[in-house]
Image (tube, rainbow, N blue to C red):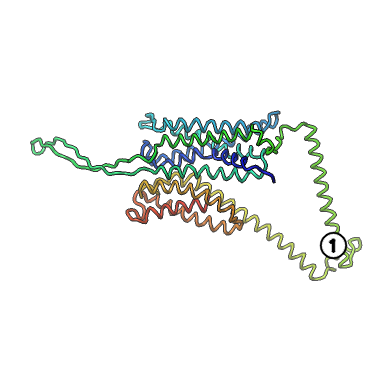
Amino acid sequence: MDSKVLVHLLVCIFAISSWVDINGMWVELPILVTHLPEKWTLPSYITIISQIANIGPIIFVLISLCLKRTHVKKLTLDKITSYIIMIVGVASTLLLAFFWEETIFVDGADRSFALLALSFFLSFVDCTSSVAYVAFMASLKPVYLSSFFVGEGLSGLLPALMALGQGAGEIKCVNASSTSERNVSGNVVNVTDYYVYPTYLPPRFSVQLFFLLLCGMIFLSMVAFSLLNFWGYCKDQLVAVSMYNLEDSDNLRDSIDLEDEVKDVSFRKTSYSYEMTVSLEDEVGVNNKDFPASQAREKLPNHVENKIVSDDSAEVQHQKTSKFVLFLLLLQIVIINFLITAFLLSIQVYSSLPYGIDTYNLVVTLSNIANPVACIISVFLSITSPWIISLMTTCGLGCSAYIIALACLSPTPPLIGTSSGGPVATAAGCDISKSLD
């Protein structure tokens, strides 16, 4: 199928905006938890907010269903929604760059209201992009779908590489002392207390610059999306016609054509069945008019009858196996989504941070890098066997169990204080992304 390299590039850049902002939020957590009042509980707050934001796709689908009864083009809805997603993403990341540290006093404690509220908007539009962007891609030639998924992978890879270059800063222990007057046996004496407290050295570049870079990425995606829609160079790559553009006569004609196709397929199947029956009758020398089906089958040669019985048994067994495999794969999807999108994210800080801020930073960033790398490998090394998929899922679940155990035993998990504790936790986190994502 004919395609244009530049259109592939524009589609890839457009798709980067799908999850780049909320992925950027996650990889920035190693720095955020050391500066914001929520501390280690911040990932749990963001996880809950992200799950609530899943109402976005539901709202989009409901609006699409309502528009079916109107003359509004569905493609117009896809474009408008996509623009809203990117505009909200640009505005939210821009505001985060300047207000991420702002807090308000609520319920007896300081709360990072600005960051949490903007996280909701980012999660809302990113979740909605999963349906709106794919709906828009239906208007392009199918050959560009692979470029779209590459762009989605980059939406996790690019922020992770930025965070890896940024670093999480270092913890430096500072010696300090304080002098106070104390009453000792009726005498007032000066007492000097010595203590050590940690200070966090700044990363290689600031959190503000990080969010501004995310804002720039989303803006570039919006430019690419505009070029896909309005640049004449891309017009001949638009192939889909919205169902809301069709007049009643077109709908009727399409229905008639579809009915004719169904009848034609039915006729061919009936003819094929009839030919097979006649061929079988010729082989055994019987006619259905003279013999009932049971007697005709008795006239069959043994090899023909055995073949029919074995084929019937194989078909029944295949149906049972297919249902079991389908149930097994669906069950794995449910478990994987529960772990990857919610549970493990909320406890990641408890399983990694006891080994040091650098370990936590590596777990977060390398996990986001491992996911797109695994997706790229799967393009060239496709695995379709459900049993191999189940084996990989089992490996991922084993690593998940280890991460959960580390979180339960925090702040003194196994191997803490040793040189192998951090690398093992990092490897387990990366293996989860590689095996389950």
Q: Please tell me which residue lies in front, 37 or 408.
A: 37
Q: Which residue lies at the image location 10% right of the left edge and 38% below the top edge?
A: 184
Of helix, strand and loop, which one carries label 1? helix
Percent position (x, y) of residue 125? 54, 35
Q: Relative to residue 345, is residue 234 drawn left or right?
A: right
Q: Is residue 427 left or right of residue 392?
A: left
Above or below: residue 219 compared with residue 375? above
Q: Position of residue 226 (x, y in %)?
A: 60, 32
Residue in the picture at 81% in, 37% down: 253
Image location (x, y in percent) of residue 364: 44, 46
Instruction: Say above or below: 228 vs 363.
Output: above
Residue 169, image x, y percentages = 36, 43
State the residue at coordinates (47%, 46%). 343
Q: What amino acid type is highlighted by mark number 1?
A: Ala
Q: How many marks?
A: 1
From this viewpoint, which residue is outermost toward the right?
290
Q: Is residue 224 left or right of residue 46?
A: right
Question: Are there few (<14), some (14-19), or many (20+) residues within 10 Å of tag 1?
Answer: few
Task: Answer above or below: position of 182 versus 300.
Answer: above
Which residue does the numbered mark 1 point to in the structure image?
293
Q: Nearer the viewer, residue 115 or 53?
A: 115
Quadrant for residue 136, please give it.
Answer: top right
